[in-house]
């Protein structure tokens, strides 16, 4: 079991390294004429294992759907909806995510034969079984009818900040689901140990670990153990729905700013789930524990 835990830890560290250096999703584009003044534009995502991205319509609110925002162009009209076909699904089959790659296709029609560019923004999120990286937002410009002109990336804003070691815990004040402000010190000061959990309703690994935390919370709360869940949601309805669905009875807070939250910047959060345990005086005694490793640590702390 120790070997399994070590493997999981090494996997998480590897994924964090990917988040900091090379994003696991890359894009390439093509434009092919299929009729007079009509072109088929393909947006092809390559995804490095073990990550995946989500379809344009993500069922159940889990995972952030991939979205394309096209900039208006007077010489160009979009024809029909943007279709998608993943390498790991058959035509017409619905999947929860794409792990081997996916091609999005948009048909466009020009009003004249003049050279025309298509500018657009792609929003997407890469996750694996252990964590989700911050949402990415990239803007590109491609030539529709100029084969000599290469695609250009206008801006790139993967929102992950450089990871940094958490040195000190700081008290904070954030709204709860009812809108009332919650002061963390009122919770941490009266408990021997408090588990600070960064999560989000759309993060599948977060939800799995959150549900696994419930029996440990019930087991140790009478001994002085508490939990504060800090959500990186931006949709209050989805956040509250997840709390109710998974039955998180501990304190939940969020400023609804997602990865733009001051808490993300303060603690250098580059992926979620992320957690740490603090003692009554605010000293961090453990980080990124879950499952059997968390249970083992709690047994040690409350012996």
Image: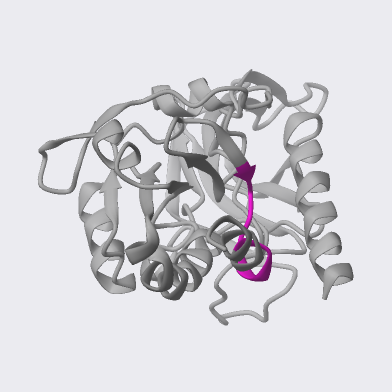
**Image quadrant for the C terminus?**
bottom right
Depicted 34 relative to depicted 119: above or below: below
Q: Is residue 36 visible?
A: no
**Furthest-right residue in view?**
3
Residue depicted at 60% across the width and 54% down the height: 105
**Image quadrant for the N terminus?**
bottom right
Q: Is residue 50 visible?
A: yes
* Residue 63 x, y percent position in the rendering: 49, 58
* Residue 272 x, y percent position in the rendering: 56, 47
5 left or right of 243 in image: right
Colouring: one colour
The magenta span reads 286-294
Queried whether the magenta region covers residue 219, the answer comes back as no
Depicted 82 relative to depicted 233: above or below: below
Residue depicted at 11% across the width and 40% down the height: 179
Q: Nearer the viewer, residue 216 or 53?
A: 216
**Furthest-top residue in view?**
154
255 left or right of 64 in image: left
Residue depicted at 61% across the width and 40% down the height: 285
* Residue 150 x, y percent position in the rendering: 79, 24
Q: How many marks?
A: 0
191 left or right of 251 in image: right
Q: Nearer the viewer, residue 55 or 272?
A: 272
32 left or right of 148 in image: left
Q: Nearer the viewer, residue 68 or 238?
A: 238
* Residue 92 x, y percent position in the rendering: 56, 81
Depicted 7 relative to depicted 4: above or below: above
Q: Nearer the viewer, residue 16 or 83?
A: 16
């Amino acid at each position: 079991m120790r070997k399994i835990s070590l493997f999981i830890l090494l996997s998480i560290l590897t994924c964090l390294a990917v988040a900091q250096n090379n994003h696991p999703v890359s894009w390439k584009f093509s434009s092919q004429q299929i009729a007079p003044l009509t072109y088929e534009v393909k947006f092809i995502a390559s995804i490095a294992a073990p990550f995946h991205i989500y379809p344009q319509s993500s069922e159940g609110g889990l995972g952030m759907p991939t979205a394309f925002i096209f900039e208006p162009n007077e010489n160009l009209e979009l024809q029909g909806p943007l279709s998608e076909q993943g390498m790991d699904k058959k035509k017409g089959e619905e999947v929860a995510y794409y792990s081997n790659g996916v091609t999005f296709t948009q048909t466009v029609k020009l009003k004249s034969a003049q050279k025309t560019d298509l500018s657009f923004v792609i929003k997407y999120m890469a996750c694996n079984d252990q964590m989700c990286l911050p949402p990415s937002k990239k803007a590109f410009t491609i030539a529709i009818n100029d084969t000599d002109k290469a695609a250009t990336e206008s801006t790139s804003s993967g929102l992950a900040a450089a990871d940094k070691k958490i040195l000190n815990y700081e008290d904070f004040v954030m709204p709860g689901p009812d809108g009332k402000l919650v002061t963390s010190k009122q919770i941490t000061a009266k408990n021997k140990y408090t588990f600070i959990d960064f999560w989000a309703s759309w993060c599948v690994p977060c939800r799995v670990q959150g549900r696994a935390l419930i029996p440990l919370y019930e087991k140790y709360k009478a001994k002085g153990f508490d939990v504060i869940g800090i959500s990186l949601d931006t949709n209050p309805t989805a956040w509250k729905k997840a709390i109710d669905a998974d039955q998180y009875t501990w304190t939940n807070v969020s400023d609804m700013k997602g990865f733009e939250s001051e808490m993300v910047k303060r603690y250098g959060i580059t992926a979620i789930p992320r957690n740490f345990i603090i003692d009554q005086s605010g000293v961090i005694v453990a980080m990124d524990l879950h499952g059997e490793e968390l249970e083992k640590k709690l047994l040690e702390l409350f012996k």
